[in-house]
């Protein structure tokens, strides 16, 4: 088709559309209707925190919309591929300190009993991350009467004034849609909604590095595999083939001849779109560089093949809101108690440096920063300046050191469940989440088997 033909075709098409000859008026009408939605609770992000928040709020009877940029829920477990339920149990006693939805998910994954008091290891793994997606799909669909799930949906704007979020703009196959909600829960991980709404937040100039997880098939298990893998990566780095790495963690989690690898380390700013894109590309390059080094230099990999790298690089740290209370390292290490405690954490202060660390994830001894199970107060989920917003997951209000512990999977689920219950209470009572008493949230959580750990 020539340029002239294309120009005439465009003119004809425009005229035909205007005349109604081309297009589906019913579909156009539906699309227009979908450009504005309203709900009691809007949850932005369907990762560990957001999924728990959605289930908790919907089970409380509230009308809920959950938006998630991936085509499935689960966040770091499904999009990044981390199968660990970090934070479910005390490292010393293996006592389960987070129950509620987190324990339900672990149990329904076949790892433990529904009423388990202890687990075999303090950070158990689920057996299959794809089956975990299916589990979450089923649980979300069970609440379809009052829970609308929008996958493949990006939060791209926030309209706030007078200390309230008036609407959140999302983008998906329906185009741009404005969602109005009485209460919004930011489970984005990066505090996108809170930051764009004008809530105060912190972000260190240098944040923890990002990690892409990957799997390699047909690897032989040998007595010297860990040592051989370390030596091969040191050689690859010396040759300029690999900028940074850690460990590496080589684990036969999913099959007798299939390894799951922790090892990629990419310094980046995950709140900067261009830098995040660079990090994704660097992560894939580094994962394949590790595979090539092992294939070349480690006999156990002689017949191996690269199975997959998970779709997203994993983010440990970015923005943290400055909330009504800022949880700090002393609170964790001294075991400070809070009347408004709504969750329990127990992970060590897990800070990854932006450099190579051989044989370990950290450049310090983890046991020196290992707290006993500690309280997380409701006030750390409440941002300043925005009255109808809760924040749950790794972007809640904490210092960088405290956040290094609270950021993990199960602790995020516990905060998400608390946020979902609190938001439902606020909507039902026609009040603000800022006015809800944290002790009432705690009591409501206890009634459904959640909330902070108590002895007995």
Image (cartoon, rainbow, N blue to C red):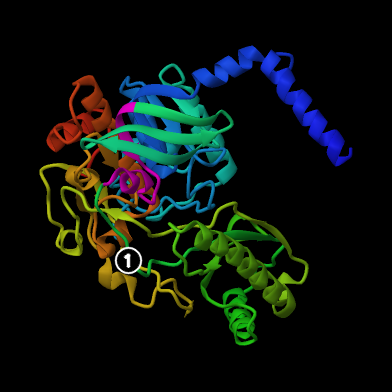
Is residue 348 depicted above or below 159 in this figure?
below
Q: Going 21% across and 35% down the picture, which residue do you hit?
A: 162
Write down the quadrant of residue 155 in the picture.
Answer: top left
Q: Is residue 418 above or below residue 221?
A: above
Numbered-mark total: 1
Q: Is residue 53 visible?
A: yes
Q: In the rendered view, does 152 fall on the left or right side of 199?
A: right
- Neighbour class for label 1 at 10 Å: few (<14), some, many (≥20)? few
Question: Eyeballing the image, is 158 above or below 89?
Answer: above
Q: Which residues are magenta?
A: 181-198
Residue closest to the eye, 276 or 306: 276
Residue at the location (51% across, 69% down)?
A: 265
Quarter holding the N terminus is top right
Pointer 1 residue: 204
Q: Quadrant of the C terminus?
A: top left
Q: Is residue 347 visible?
A: no
Residue 348 point in image, percent of width and height: 31, 63
Specify whether residue 182 is painted magenta.
Answer: yes
x, y percent for residue 404: 32, 62
């Amino acid at each position: 088709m020539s340029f002239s033909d294309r120009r005439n075709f465009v003119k004809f098409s425009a005229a035909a559309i205007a005349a109604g000859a081309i297009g589906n008026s019913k579909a156009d009408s539906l699309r227009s209707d979908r450009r504005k939605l309203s709900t009691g609770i809007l949850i932005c992000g369907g990762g560990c925190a957001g999924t728990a928040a959605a289930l908790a709020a919907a089970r409380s009877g509230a009308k809920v919309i959950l938006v998630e940029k991936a085509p499935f829920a689960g966040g770091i477990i499904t999009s990044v591929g981390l199968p660990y339920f970090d934070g479910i149990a005390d490292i010393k006693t293996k006592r389960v300190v987070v129950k509620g939805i987190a324990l339900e998910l672990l149990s329904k994954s076949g790892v433990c009993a529904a009423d388990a008091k202890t687990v075999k290891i303090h950070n158990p793994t689920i057996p299959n991350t794809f089956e975990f997606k299916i589990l979450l799909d089923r649980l979300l669909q069970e609440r379809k009467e009052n829970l609308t799930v929008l996958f493949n949906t990006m939060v791209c704007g926030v309209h706030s004034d007078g200390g309230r979020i008036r609407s959140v703009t999302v983008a998906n196959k329906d185009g741009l849609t404005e969602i109005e909600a009485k209460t919004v829960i930011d489970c984005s991980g990066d505090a996108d909604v809170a930051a764009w709404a004008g809530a105060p937040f912190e972000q260190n100039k240098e944040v923890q590095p990002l990690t892409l997880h990957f799997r390699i098939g047909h690897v032989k298990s040998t007595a010297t595999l860990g040592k051989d893998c370390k030596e091969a990566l040191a050689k690859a780095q010396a040759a300029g083939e690999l900028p940074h790495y850690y460990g590496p963690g080589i684990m036969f989690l999913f099959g007798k001849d299939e390894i799951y690898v922790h090892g990629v380390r990419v310094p980046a700013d995950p709140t900067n779109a261009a830098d995040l894109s660079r990090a994704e590309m660097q992560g894939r390059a580094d994962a394949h560089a590790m595979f090539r080094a092992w294939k070349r230099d480690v006999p156990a990999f002689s017949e191996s093949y690269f199975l997959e790298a998970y779709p997203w690089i994993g983010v440990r740290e970015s923005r943290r809101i400055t909330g009504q209370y800022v949880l700090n390292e002393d609170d964790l290490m001294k075991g400070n108690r809070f009347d408004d405690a709504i969750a329990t954490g127990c992970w060590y202060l897990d800070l990854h440096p932006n450099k190579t660390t051989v044989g370990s994830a950290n450049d310090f001894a983890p046991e020196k920063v290992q707290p006993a199970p500690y309280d997380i107060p409701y006030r750390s989920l409440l941002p300043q300046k925005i009255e109808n917003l809760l924040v749950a997951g790794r972007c809640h209000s904490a210092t960088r050191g405290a956040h290094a512990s609270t950021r993990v999977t199960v602790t995020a689920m516990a905060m998400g469940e608390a946020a979902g219950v609190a938001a439902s209470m606020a909507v039902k009572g026609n009040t603000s989440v800022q006015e809800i008493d944290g002790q009432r949230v705690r009591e409501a959580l206890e009634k459904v088997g959640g909330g902070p750990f108590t002895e007995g």
